[in-house]
Every structure is written in C-alpha cells, then in structure tokens.
Amino acid sequence: MFSRRTALLGGLALAACGSAEAQVRFAGPRARALIAAARRQVGVTLSYDPAYTRIAYPGGDVPRAKGVCTDVVIRAYRDALGVDLQSEVHRDMAANFSAYPRRWGLRRPDSNIDHRRVPNLERYWTRKAASLPIPAPVREWQPGDLFTALIDGRLPHTGIVSDRLAGNGNPLVIHNIGSGAREEDMLLAWKPTGRFRWRL
C-alpha cells in the first residue's frame, strides 16, 4: 500500500532506535520527562490521520491511536509537564490573531485545529522567545529541543529531539511522519526550518 510515509521518505533508509545500540545523552529533568512522555506514544499512536476533528477545549485530543506530527509534541507536553498547547495557542491567537499565518483562510481562532498546525506552533514558540539558532554541528541539538522542517520544501513537520544517539552520532527524534509515533534517525532527513526550546 502506498502510504504518506513512503511518499515523504522517498525510499530513505531509516535507522530506528534500538535502545541497546543507542548512546544516551544527559538531559535535564524536564527534558527527560518530555522525552519519556513522547517515547511512551511509540506503539500507541499507530497511524497518521490529518482529518479535521472537533475536540474538547481545553485538554482536547483525537484518539491516541492516531494523530499527526504535532500531536506527538502536544501529548508529550501535557503528559510530562501539564502544559496544554491547545489552550496556550488558542489564547495567544485569540489575543493576537493577526500575528499568526493566514494560509487557511480563517477569520478567527479555531481551538479544534490551530495548535495542530506546525506553522502556528512555530509562530507561537517564536512569540514566546523559545526560538534558537539552528546549529551547524548536529550534536549541538539538545535533548528536548523541538525541530521543525519542510519536507520536500512544502510539507511542515515537527518532533522532539531524543536523548539517544544513532550509531552514526546523530540525535534521534520522536515524531509521526506517517506510520504513527516512532523514534528514528531523521533529524537530517530534511533541512530544519526551526529549533525551539520551550519550558525546559
């Protein structure tokens, strides 16, 4: 079956995390908690589903068996740190709607979907002074950092940098690119567009 994952990766070989092989890096307690909460989604979130869904507010979520890349981040922050990005983004958009991307033709915030869109999260984290320079040496990415990228120059993507390194020294990331939450050597699969460190 032709999946989104196959289309996006274009045959790129993946190095999935094998805990026996991966080197673990030091991470502060909040970063460790965030990464652990993201890792607990592996094997639980099994599919990628971008469908618009009405959800509760605050604290709303689609069923955990499915989701998109942003849901990995949203769930990790809720589970680990008690931070609700749905509420955070919605409140900021309600007060500063013109500061956010207008590419979806919306005239007002929508708490069902706004926090699940990568460009909105990029803008929110930037507005909260969480943006960091994108490092040239890949090892400068720190555990718990949030990355954003454009896949094939057009599809926004995000995930969390792990505290584990692949055998080649690259930091693994925890994300959902099309087949559910996974921990993989994918940080350099596409050119990063953003690096953020928020509330760690």
Image (cartoon, rainbow, N blue to C red):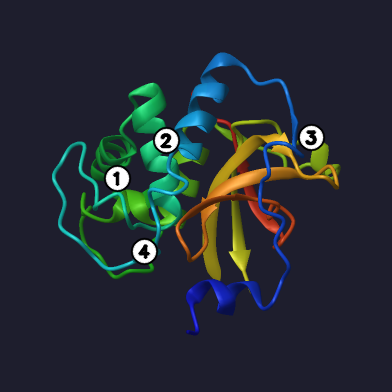
- Under tag 1, what secondary structure? helix
Q: Earlier in the sequence, mark 4 or mark 2?
A: 2
Q: CA distance from mark 2 to mark 1?
A: 21 Å
Residue visible at 35% across and 57% down in the picture: 67
Q: Which residue is mark 2?
A: 76
Of circles 2 and 1, the one toward us is 2
Image coords of residue 138 (percent x, y):
81, 43
Q: Amino acid at mark 4?
A: Arg
Residue visible at 83% across and 45% down in the picture: 167
Q: Which residue is mark 4?
A: 102
Q: Earlier in the sequence, mark 4 or mark 1?
A: 1
Q: Residue 93: which disc?
A: 1
Mark 1 nearby-residue class (10 Å; few <14, some 14–19, many ≥20): many
Q: Left or right: 102 with respect to 186?
A: left
Of circles 4 and 2, the one toward us is 2
Q: Quadrant of residue 154?
A: bottom right
Q: CA distance from mark 3 to mark 2?
A: 22 Å
Image coords of residue 57 (percent x, y):
15, 41
- Please name whichever residue, 75 or 107, is drawn nearer the observer in this view of the structure: 75
Instruction: Let me know if residue 200 appears in the view.
Output: no
- Under tag 3, what secondary structure? helix
Q: Which residue is mark 3?
A: 140
- Please name whichever residue, 146 or 106, is drawn nearer the observer in this view of the structure: 146
Residue visible at 54% across and 51% down in the picture: 182
